[in-house]
Image (cartoon, helix red, strand yellow):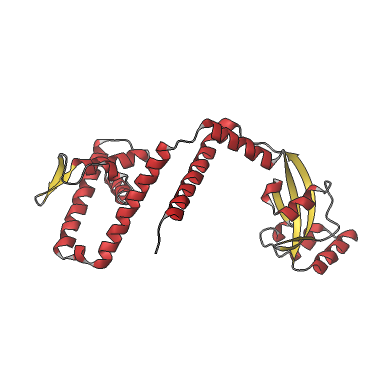
Amino acid sequence: MNRTLRHTLLAALSVSLFAAPALAAKKDGEGTAFVTVNGKAIPKNRADALINGQAAQGQPDSPELRNAVKEELVRREILTQEATRKGLDKNSEVQAQVELSRQGVLIGAYLRNYAQSHPIGDDQIRAEYESLKAKLGSKEYKTRHILVDTADEATALIEKLNKGEKFEELAKQSKDPGSKERGGDLGWATPTSFVKPFSDAMLKLEKGKYTTVPVKSDFGWHVIQLDDTRELKLPTFDEAKGQIAQQLQQRMIQKHVEDLRAKAKVE
């Protein structure tokens, strides 16, 4: 077996052991032995769990993978036996870590089961897609801004703009480190990307114009210039469907967990 491939597979397996969905397998004492180490049988279902975990990550089943699984399980069993021989399995900190790992596997299995039994329907995905389209609107806006601490500072900047000074030069005084070195350029964005006072002021501007009064937000005081607008090109429903379904599923699971927490008796 190619040494590099073997090392790659072993490394991947070592990581996947902490995440493999092994709860669907039988108990350790059940099933056909996959390999025996110092008289202790390692059940085949444990190897199957690892192989299935690798398959879920795109690794095809192969003799090389099965050999790597065998070596990893043997290595782990040898080390586990040594740790047990030294009494480390009785250590309270080790026991706590084992329990946390057990809980993590159980939680993962429970949430996967919940998601499978509560599938997201196409009608839900379509409704979310239409809602997002409505929120985003039909246009993108290319803006610049200068952010300062006080209304007086913003007013002084507007007066300088009125006298013909360049917005890009004045933007070097901005508190916004992400845009000050780019002449205040914020790039292309939809109104929903900004806080409401900012977007409200921006939407009132004509191309090439700047705000004639300071704009207050939670970040400070803004002077805003609208450089350009263009039609917003949204992904089609089919293009966005997978990502929206994933977001809806995550939202559903989060709400379920919050509901369980609200019902729990915690003392």
User: Is 142 positioned to the left or the right of 38 in the image?
Assistant: right
Residue 89 at what x, y percent from top left?
A: 20, 62
Q: Is residue 238 left or right of residue 188?
A: left
Which residue sits at x=83%, y=55%?
Answer: 211
Which quarter of the rendered picture does the N terminus lie within?
Answer: top left
- Quarter location, residue 26: top left
Classify 167 as above or below 249: below
Residue 67 visible somewhere in the drawing: no
Point 22% across, 67% down: residue: 91
Q: Residue at x 70, y 60 (%)?
A: 181
| In the depicted structure, whether residue 160 falls above or below residue 64 | below
In the rendered structure, the answer to whether residue 188 lies left or right of residue 126 reads right
Image point (76%, 42%), residue name: 229
How many numbered badges does the structure rendering display?
0
Question: Could you tell me residue 95's position as x and y percent?
Answer: 25, 62
Can residue 228 be spotted in the picture? yes
The extreme right residue here reads: 163
Residue 240 at x, y = what percent?
Answer: 56, 36
* Residue 256, horizontal then vertical, whole percent: 46, 47
Q: Quadrant of the C terminus?
A: bottom left
Position of 94 compared to 255: left or right?
Answer: left
Task: Say which of 98 and 12 sits in front.
Answer: 98
58, 97: nearer the viewer: 97
